[in-house]
């Protein structure tokens, strides 16, 4: 029995060789697989490092790390993250090449296609960018759809350099104003330096603070027509009006009409604009002031996200005599104002601004502006001439798809050149305004916006010391 189940020495040797062969093969296979894993891990590590820096909102560091790992170019995973980092860091050409290499291996990756389109846009390859964004729009949703539409709108605006473009809008609104006439409370006893305190202001005076509801309407159209590469003619016309709810306050109703036109020239990073403007303001359906202006603007695109804006303006303000009420209850009828012989002036102004866009959450855009102007009365009334100083800071955000928000703060100081009538010192005003708004875009054409504005003006002449709060909602339709 023992002999029947025993193996010969030769059989044992052959079995051992077969077993050894299997082990050798397994060892070789394990070695190969291990080497592959090590190589893959080594290749993935630089890509993961670039990805981690992108997730930390450090595109420049991610780009620099990628540049230091040039031997990884051609590895799809590395090319994907390096391409995005290069575009975000301001090296769109390198980013586009990397993403094009990646898409040869993975043509259906939507994120890669979106970032490639973004790279084309930065490089000014508008047709290729448009094609990519439109292909994505076919089945895009949520954030991707909103972002693609914004880029397509920007491409359309930029194409004004090459093809005629135009747009128009209509807007209507409702709101409440705590001080429609920038007045002071009835019963107040304003003071004038050197003159003393005035008698208490009657409640029936048109200078007494009036609160009311209001409705608004605005219409406008604009367009551009290229006449040579980078050179375009542009123009715009507009009308806006504000009507108050209380019939007694229709004497404060306003309407403005105007238009502007000029020429613009774009050369690489620089944009030059020169134009003429005309505006006519009406109060109580009467001509109040007309403005004829000459303006110029220079813009310099520092990089992908920062832009410098410089501007200047010359204008003439011509005032018309009006029939006005002295009482807000309209008792006693109207009297004739003397605006035409007192108020005409020339204005000279300059401004400087900085606009910065951030590729972070909510896509914030920061706008800082400073301005200085001189309004010089031409009717020998230096007490109506003034120096104007202004500052403004504003930020716009996209907190969610289809939503927009804005916040701003403005400061203006008026320094008049001669003493106020009856007083011993010139008038001086300082006004601070805070404003905010939130918009919802039902579609590319139709949007609704809520607005809030608060103004506090301090003046050494009590007649011009006031607070004002305005809240409103507007609906707008754009024809594109």
Image (cartoon, rainbow, N blue to C red):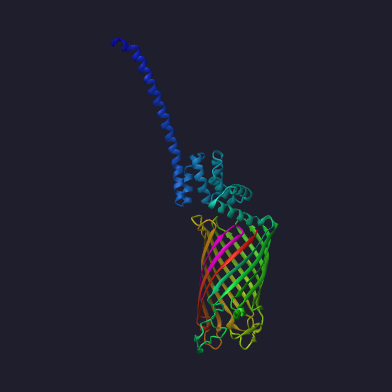
Specify start and end residues of the magenta stretch as a single range: 431-451
**As drawn, 45 above or below 277:** above
Tell me if residue 39 is in the magenta stretch. Answer: no
Q: Where is residue 273 drawn, in percent x and y?
A: 64, 63
Quadrant, the C terminus: bottom right
Residue 384: x and y in percent read 59, 81
- Is any atom of residue 461 visible in this view? no
Quadrant of res 305: bottom right
Q: Locate residue 240 relative to residue 452 in the image: left or right.
A: right
Horizontal and vertical percent position of residue 292: 67, 73
Q: Quadrant of the N terminus?
A: top left
Along the line of sight, the residue nearer the viewer: 61 or 54: 54
Q: Is residue 375 visible?
A: yes
Magenta: predominant secondary structure element? strand
| Residue 191 x %, y % | 50, 86
Residue occupying the point 64% across, 58% down: 266
Asked where in the image residue 108 lies, by quadrant, the reply is top right
Residue 306 sits above or below residue 71 on the image: below
Residue 28: image quadrant is top left
């Amino acid at each position: 029995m023992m002999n029947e189940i025993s193996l010969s020495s030769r059989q044992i040797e052959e079995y051992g060789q077969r077993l050894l062969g299997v082990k050798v093969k397994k060892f070789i296979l394990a070695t190969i697989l291990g080497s592959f894993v090590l190589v893959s891990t080594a290749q993935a590590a630089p890509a993961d490092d670039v990805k981690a820096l992108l997730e930390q909102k450090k595109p420049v560091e991610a780009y620099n790390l990628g540049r230091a790992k040039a031997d990884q170019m051609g590895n799809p995973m590395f090319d994907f993250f390096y391409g995005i980092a290069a575009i975000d860091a301001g090296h769109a050409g390198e980013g586009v090449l990397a993403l094009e290499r990646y898409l040869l291996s993975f043509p259906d990756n939507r994120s890669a296609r979106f970032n490639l389109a973004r790279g084309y846009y930065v490089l000014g390859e508008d047709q290729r960018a448009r094609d990519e964004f439109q292909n994505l729009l076919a089945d895009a949703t949520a954030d991707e759809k909103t972002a693609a539409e914004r880029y397509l709108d920007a491409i359309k605006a930029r194409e004004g350099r090459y093809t005629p473009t135009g747009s128009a809008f209509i807007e209507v609104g409702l709101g409440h104003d705590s001080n429609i006439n920038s007045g002071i409370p009835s019963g107040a006893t304003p003071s004038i330096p050197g003159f003393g305190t005035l008698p208490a202001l009657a409640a029936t005076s048109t200078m007494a603070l009036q609160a009311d509801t209001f409705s608004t309407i605005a219409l406008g159209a604009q367009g551009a027509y290229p006449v040579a590469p980078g050179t375009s003619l542009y123009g715009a016309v507009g009308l806006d009006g504000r009507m108050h709810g209380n019939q007694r306050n229709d004497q404060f109703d306003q309407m403005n009409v105007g238009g502007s036109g000029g020429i613009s020239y774009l050369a690489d990073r620089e944009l030059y604009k020169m134009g003429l403007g005309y505006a006519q303001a009406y109060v109580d359906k009467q001509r109040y002031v007309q403005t004829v202006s000459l303006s110029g603007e220079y813009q310099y695109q520092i990089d992908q996200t920062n832009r410098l804006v410089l501007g200047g303006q010359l204008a003439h303000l011509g005032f018309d005599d009006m029939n006005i009420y002295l009482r807000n209850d309209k008792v006693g009828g109207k009297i004739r104002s003397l605006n035409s012989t007192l108020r005409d002036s020339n204005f000279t102004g300059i401004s400087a601004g900085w606009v910065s866009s951030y590729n972070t959450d909510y896509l914030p855009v920061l706008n800082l502006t400073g301005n200085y102007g001189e309004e010089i009365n031409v009717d020998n009334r230096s007490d109506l001439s003034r120096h104007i100083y202004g500052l403004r800071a504003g930020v716009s955000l996209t907190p969610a798809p289809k939503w927009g928000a804005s916040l701003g703060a403005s400061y203006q100081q008026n320094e008049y050149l001669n003493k106020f009538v009856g007083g011993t010192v010139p008038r001086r005003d300082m006004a601070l305004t805070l404003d905010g708004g939130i918009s919802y875009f039902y579609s590319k054409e139709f949007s609704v916006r809520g607005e809030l504005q608060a103004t506090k003006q301090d003046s050494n002449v009590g007649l011009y010391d006031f607070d004002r709060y305005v809240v409103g909602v507007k609906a707008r339709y754009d024809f594109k």
